[in-house]
Amino acid sequence: MPQSKKRKPHQHPHDYIPHKKKRKSAVPVAMGFCMILGLGIAWFAAGPSIPGLLAGIAGGAIVGWVAGKQMDKAFK
């Protein structure tokens, strides 16, 4: 059968579905930086004592996690 020239062509809504690109998180970078910074502060504050260094690393990890989450929120 002949096609009508006034009829709109058939639409294909599922031909192209754009996908959002996944963004990488800033949390691991911020945690690593703050852990090293916390280790350095603990080294100068407590000397080479293991509990002091572990406390500095743990504190730095917590601060880095919070800072990384805030960075992710700011970049969105």
Image (cartoon, rainbow, N blue to C red):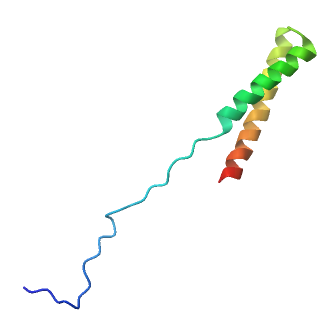
Rendering coords of residue 70 (x, y %)? 74, 46
Q: Quadrant of the C terminus?
A: bottom right
Residue drawn 90% across the image and 16% down it: 44
Residue drawn 77% across the image and 29% down it: 34
Q: Is residue 61 above or below residue 69?
A: above
Horizontal relation, residue 12 to residue 23: left or right: left
Residue 64: image quadrant is: top right
Q: Is residue 29 above or below residue 76?
A: above
Horizontal relation, residue 23 to residue 61: left or right: left
Along the viewing direction, whichever of 51 and 74 lies nearer the viewer: 74
Horizontal relation, residue 43 to residue 21: left or right: right
Residue 3: image quadrant is: bottom left
Rendering coords of residue 15 (x, y %)? 31, 64
Rendering coords of residue 16 (x, y %)? 35, 62
Residue drawn 44% across the image and 55% down it: 19
Going by the picture, which residue comes out furthest to the left? 1
Residue drawn 71% across the image and 40% down it: 68
Along the viewing direction, whichever of 60 and 75 lies nearer the viewer: 75
Q: Is residue 76 above or below residue 24?
A: below
Going by the picture, which residue comes out furthest to the front? 5
Rendering coords of residue 61 (x, y %)? 75, 29
Along the viewing direction, whichever of 18 and 54 lies nearer the viewer: 18
